[in-house]
Image (cartoon, helix red, strand yellow):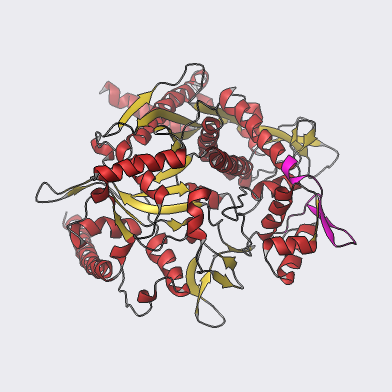
């Protein structure tokens, strides 16, 4: 007993030491954070509570809503997803789905009236996909004519076992795209999604590793050109996207063919339209002409051809290619989520060992990611076309994109001269921890709702680093094997906000700071593009983000979005204080659908109960232990 006592005492001492060390470190960083707030950061905080209490300001917001959205009745849809996987002895079942909660906000009333609505029974709002896959198919050997090689591919197993989360993301995007594409009287003016839209865009925008090239659809096959054109979207002239930064500059060239609806342009026309140097243009043209890309993959056909007269021609029409790819996305998702046709995830490819033979394979996560990126880009363009506000809400994040990436880069390019000589001690570890401490310790006058300024989501991948050659600070992207990744700029604006804060008691009560991602509205956010602060170096090229530098900058769309979210945050449910109610209702719906799906999936093992050998020894042992405990 003395030895055990010594072990537990040592563990206790370690815990006490670690806790004391953490509290001391937290106190130091908190003091540094408060000092930094009072010396600079307070100008990046927008106190919306005082504005929303004014009847005149609320009237201004109603007028603003009619100008931005052409209506004072804001129909909304909140979307959340669910997924699971269950591995049995002989097969694995994947499930992914999404659920939508629908309602409206009537701004004519003061305070506004929120009303939830039922979906029509003939419209499937719970998009669900069940994918039962035999383990024999995980090695992509489902074709009976393929010779057995007795080689098990661990990579295929890992890829396939992670596909349920990809299916959930695809279901969420497809549901959002479906409601945005509804008839003129049915589509919403506000779409809320429980995920980081800028993070999803960054995750699926870094390459085209899909194996779907050759997928047969509508009397032809998806080819490499279609895949490249898909990544060139979304296209918008007011925001000048896609941009001409170094990473993915060829996308701007393909977008120029789309804008002019032509298959042939002279190099001088492209250079003049994009405003790039001749060297940058020729580097991009070489990429479009080469049969291989930097990561080693080979194209079946380069997307462009350079003619002797100096004109660059595409192999297909960019507009027709994009329409074809979106139609393919709609077809696969309709079959998968609405018709519940699992074969939508199966396609045939040439056998790498025998090009004359054809084998059947399941879509990998890269293939599903490509469908997701097509759907997300089509959703963005549909929202721009119909003046729909698209907002992503994230509950928890350990990111430092505001205090590290954004402030580091903007300090370097001269947006905030006062930061140049300001010595900043280490701040609290994450943006969320720092911002949640502000109303509790730094500013007792701050009331909810409040928000930070909005900053371009390009700062998720753009940050200040050290140049290895010069040992000087330089703006860099995210390193990868194909260069420095810089996610698309001028698409999403990111902010952090708090919607519940009560000072009625001695100890203030507050909800979490949540993260907001909203799609830029070209007509209203183009003013944030009219500035002279540009990141320009050899590593990332030229990047000009959307910029709202401080709380005095006029940002009408943020004002409207914060007002609508404040109206929708009722604080009726203690488990989600300070979180928009529609997303909580969508979460309820998604969890209910997921629970029923899991019950159905578990029931699929019933036929194997009469065959104990079909179950694993571990499963039988654990089941026997449970029965023993029941008898006792």
Q: Give the number of callouts.
A: 0
Q: Residue at x 55, y 57 (%)?
A: 487
Residue 551: horizontal and vertical position, in percent?
34, 59
Query: In this view, which residue lies farthest toward the right?
Result: 308
Quarter of the rendering occupied by the C terminus? top left
Task: Classify residue 10 as left or right of residue 475.
Answer: left
Residue closest to the eye, 613 or 371: 371
Bounds of the magenta span?
A: 296-320
Above or below residue 370? Residue 32 is below
Q: Is residue 540 magenta?
A: no
Task: Classify residue 117 as left or right of residue 28.
Answer: right
Residue 350: horizontal and vertical position, in percent?
79, 40
Residue 317: horizontal and vertical position, in percent?
78, 44
Residue 432 placement: quadrant? bottom left
Q: Residue at x 51, y 25 (%)?
A: 185
Is residue 89 visible in the rendered image? The answer is no
Is residue 375 visible in the rendered image? The answer is yes
Q: Main secondary structure of the magenta part?
A: loop
């Amino acid at each position: 007993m003395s030895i055990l006592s010594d072990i537990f005492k040592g563990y206790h001492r370690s815990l006490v030491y670690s806790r004391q060390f953490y509290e001391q470190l937290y106190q130091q960083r908190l003091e540094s954070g408060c000092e930094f707030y009072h010396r600079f950061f307070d100008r990046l905080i927008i106190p919306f509570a005082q504005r929303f209490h004014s009847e005149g300001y609320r009237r201004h917001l109603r007028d603003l809503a009619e100008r931005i959205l052409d209506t004072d009745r804001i129909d909304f849809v909140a979307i959340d997803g669910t997924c699971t996987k269950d591995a049995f002895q002989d097969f694995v079942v994947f499930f992914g789905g999404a659920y939508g909660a629908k309602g409206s906000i009537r701004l004519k009333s003061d305070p506004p009236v929120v009303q939830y609505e039922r979906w029509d029974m003939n419209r499937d709002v719970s998009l669900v996909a069940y994918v039962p896959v035999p383990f024999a198919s995980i090695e992509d050997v489902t074709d009976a004519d393929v010779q057995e090689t007795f080689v098990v591919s661990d990579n295929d197993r890992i890829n396939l076992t992670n596909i349920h989360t990809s299916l959930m993301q695809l279901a969420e995007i497809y549901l959002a795209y479906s409601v945005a594409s509804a008839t003129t009287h049915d589509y919403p003016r506000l779409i809320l999604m429980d995920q980081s839209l800028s993070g999803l865009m960054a995750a699926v925008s870094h390459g085209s590793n899909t194996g779907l090239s050759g997928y047969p659809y509508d009397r032809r096959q998806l080819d490499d050109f279609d895949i490249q054109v898909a990544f060139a979207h979304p296209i918008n002239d007011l925001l000048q996207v896609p941009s001409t930064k170094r990473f993915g500059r060829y996308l701007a060239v393909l977008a120029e063919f789309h804008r002019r609806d032509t298959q042939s342009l002279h190099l001088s026309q492209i250079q003049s339209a994009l405003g790039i140097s001749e060297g940058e243009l020729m580097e991009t043209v070489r990429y479009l002409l080469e049969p291989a890309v930097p990561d080693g993959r080979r194209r079946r056909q380069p997307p462009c051809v350079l003619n002797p007269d100096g004109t660059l021609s595409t192999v297909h029409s960019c507009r027709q290619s994009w329409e074809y790819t979106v139609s393919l996305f709609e077809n696969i998702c309709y079959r998968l989520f609405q018709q519940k046709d699992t074969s939508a995830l199966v396609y045939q490819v040439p056998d790498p060992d025998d090009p004359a033979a054809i084998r059947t394979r399941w879509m990998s996560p890269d293939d599903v990611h490509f469908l997701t990126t097509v759907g997300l880009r089509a959703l963005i363009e549909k929202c721009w076309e119909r003046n729909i506000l698209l907002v992503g809400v994230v509950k928890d994040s350990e990111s430092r994109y505001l205090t590290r990436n954004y402030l580091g880069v903007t300090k370097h390019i001269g947006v905030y001269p006062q930061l140049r000589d300001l010595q900043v001690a280490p701040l609290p570890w994450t943006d969320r921890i720092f911002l949640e401490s502000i109303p509790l310790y730094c500013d007792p006058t701050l009331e909810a709702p409040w928000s930070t300024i909005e900053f371009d989501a390009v700062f998720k991948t753009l940050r200040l680093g050290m140049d290895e050659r010069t040992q000087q600070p330089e703006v860099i992207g995210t390193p990868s094997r194909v260069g420095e990744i810089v996610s698309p700029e001028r698409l999403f604006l990111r902010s952090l906000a708090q919607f519940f804060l009560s000072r009625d008691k001695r100890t203030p009560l507050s909800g979490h700071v949540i993260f907001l991602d909203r799609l830029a509205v070209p007509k209203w956010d183009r003013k944030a593009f009219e500035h002279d602060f540009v990141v320009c170096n050899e590593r990332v090229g030229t990047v000009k983000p959307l910029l709202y530098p401080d709380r005095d900058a006029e940002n009408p769309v943020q004002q409207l979005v914060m007002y609508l979210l404040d109206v929708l945050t009722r604080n009726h449910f203690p488990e989600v204080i300070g979180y928009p109610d529609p997303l909580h209702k969508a979460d309820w719906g998604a969890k209910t659908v997921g629970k029923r799906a899991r019950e159905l999936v578990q029931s699929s093992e019933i036929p194997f109960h009469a065959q104990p050998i079909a179950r694993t020894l571990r499963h039988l042992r654990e089941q026997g232990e449970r029965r023993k405990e029941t008898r006792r």
